[in-house]
Image: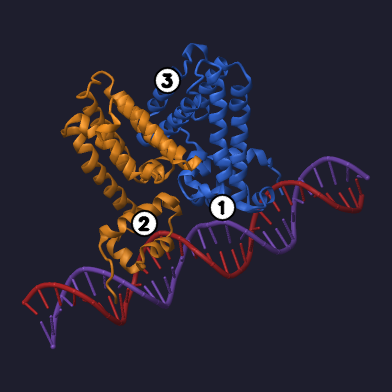
Chain colours: A orange, B blue, C purple, D red
DNA sequence: AAAGCATTGTACCAATCGGTATAGATCAAA
DNA sequence: TTTGATCTATACCGATTGGTACAATGCTTT
């Protein structure tokens, strides 16, 4: 039979969008086979654990991307530059608020229980890495609190941007957060 | 047959919690009959439109509560007092972040489409009412922007509080928002 | 070219899905 | 006490659910 796409990593982004749009329980295998153009055979070949393994793989993929592109630079790179890069990457990743945060969406309902460790770690490591950069960028005392404020702002902006169907919400909030962190827009 | 609870309004809070926990697609009729102790007969008697009507009724109920307890006072009441009352009511309603915002959760996925008008109106009217109170409380120029910031902060705090399973996130964010709005904690 | 693993489509499964139909039970008003 | 509306429980419907089984095909290695 035809061997077409067939890289496990190729389908992860498609699965991610599905889970974002329909949630874990709402994403049916029928939906998945349609979108990925993969039969159940292929699907269960790549993900023997079924839907749960698919979602876990997607979350790990996302977590890995953030770790590589955002957290590590914040921890180890030049603070001002990595802070600016974070905001730019966040804006790009969430497509100015048109895309939602899968981990945030899962966190709100019972789905959180299945992936609690991943979800908690994603936000905890983000906050710690961000606080580390802020501390080295002139916010010694309130770094953890300011970092929390930034994560809250991003997640809230995603919710509100979707609710109002307005990218401006996300852009404005990113602007405010940048200012609060002392990140000039030019240095992006 | 036994006529037990049988007030349409009695089951709305139960339905609300179910939709919060499982999302619209994830909330099955089996789940609903268990939690409400109502058979399908009763359910379809109260809500001939099925699941969709149940969710719509829940959303309208929530929207009505916010309109009555929060938006109207913000628009028509004494600004400082109604602002303080808003934060207190929000804290109580969302149980310090342990409860999630159904409208925010629906907004993130495809479910938004079904209830777009309600979801958009809920946040729009909240922002406008809040801006009205802020304007009369010494934030004439940036009232709409500050109001947006408050809604973003609340929604984001709900997401993060669930993700980290930490009520402190919600409490701290409410504190920050109160300060930004010039609401003293004592005046609650 | 033969073998053997990797990949794929399809048929199938029991369970559950949202929804309908309907008969039995309860109650207020006449 | 009868009547009619309201409420409730249950059986049932076709469709879909997540998942399994397996045979057919591709590709790589020998």
Residue B24, above or below C20: above
**Crowd around label 3: few <14 · some 14–19 · many ≥20 (10 Å):** some
| Furthest residue in direction front, as rendered | A186
Reading the image, the residue beneath label 1 is: B29
In this view, the mark in front (2 or 1): 2
In this view, the mark in front (3 or 2): 3
Reading the image, the residue beneath label 3 is: B175
Q: CA distance from mark 2 to mark 1?
A: 22 Å
Q: CA distance from mark 3 to mark 2?
A: 40 Å
User: Which residue is painted at 50% across and 44% down in the image?
Assistant: B106
- Camera sees residue A27: yes
Reading the image, the residue beneath label 2 is: A51
Image quadrant assignment for residue B157: top left
Left or right, residue A129 beside residue A29: left
**Crowd around label 2: few <14 · some 14–19 · many ≥20 (10 Å):** some
User: Which residue is painted at 54% across and 20% down in the image?
Assistant: B135
Q: Disc 3 sits on a residue from what chain?
A: B
**Crowd around label 1: few <14 · some 14–19 · many ≥20 (10 Å):** some
Left or right, residue B70 beside residue B46: left
Residue B185, above or below A81: above
Q: Nearer the viewer, residue D12 or B136?
A: B136
**Picture coordinates of residue B126 (x, y %)?**
55, 30
**Picture coordinates of residue A38 (x, y %)?**
34, 66
Tell me which label, 1 or 3, sits earlier in the chain: 1
Look at the numbered disc 3 and give the secondary structure of its residue. Answer: helix
In this view, the mark in front (1 or 3): 3
Image quadrant assignment for residue A87: top left
**Picture coordinates of residue A108 (x, y %)?**
43, 40
| Furthest residue in direction top, as rendered | B186
Look at the numbered disc 2 and give the secondary structure of its residue. Answer: helix
């Amino acid at each position: 039979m035809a061997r077409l796409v067939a890289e496990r990593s190729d389908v992860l982004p498609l699965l991610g969008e599905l889970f974002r749009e329909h949630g874990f329980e709402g994403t049916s295998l029928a939906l998945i086979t349609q979108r990925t153009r993969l039969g159940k055979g292929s699907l269960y070949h790549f993900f023997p654990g079924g839907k749960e393994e698919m979602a876990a793989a997607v979350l790990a993929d996302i977590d890995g991307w953030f770790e590589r592109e955002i957290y590590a630079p914040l921890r180890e790179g030049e603070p001002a530059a990595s802070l600016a890069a974070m905001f730019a990457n966040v804006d790009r990743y969430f497509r100015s608020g048109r895309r939602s945060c899968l981990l945030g969406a899962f966190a709100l309902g019972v789905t959180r229980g299945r992936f609690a460790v991943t979800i908690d770690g994603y936000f905890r490591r983000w906050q710690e890495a961000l606080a580390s950069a802020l501390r080295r960028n002139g916010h010694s005392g309130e770094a953890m609190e300011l970092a929390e404020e930034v994560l809250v702002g991003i997640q809230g902006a995603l919710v509100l941007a979707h609710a109002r169907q307005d990218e401006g919400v996300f852009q404005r909030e990113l602007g405010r957060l940048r200012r609060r962190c002392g990140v000039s827009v030019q240095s992006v």
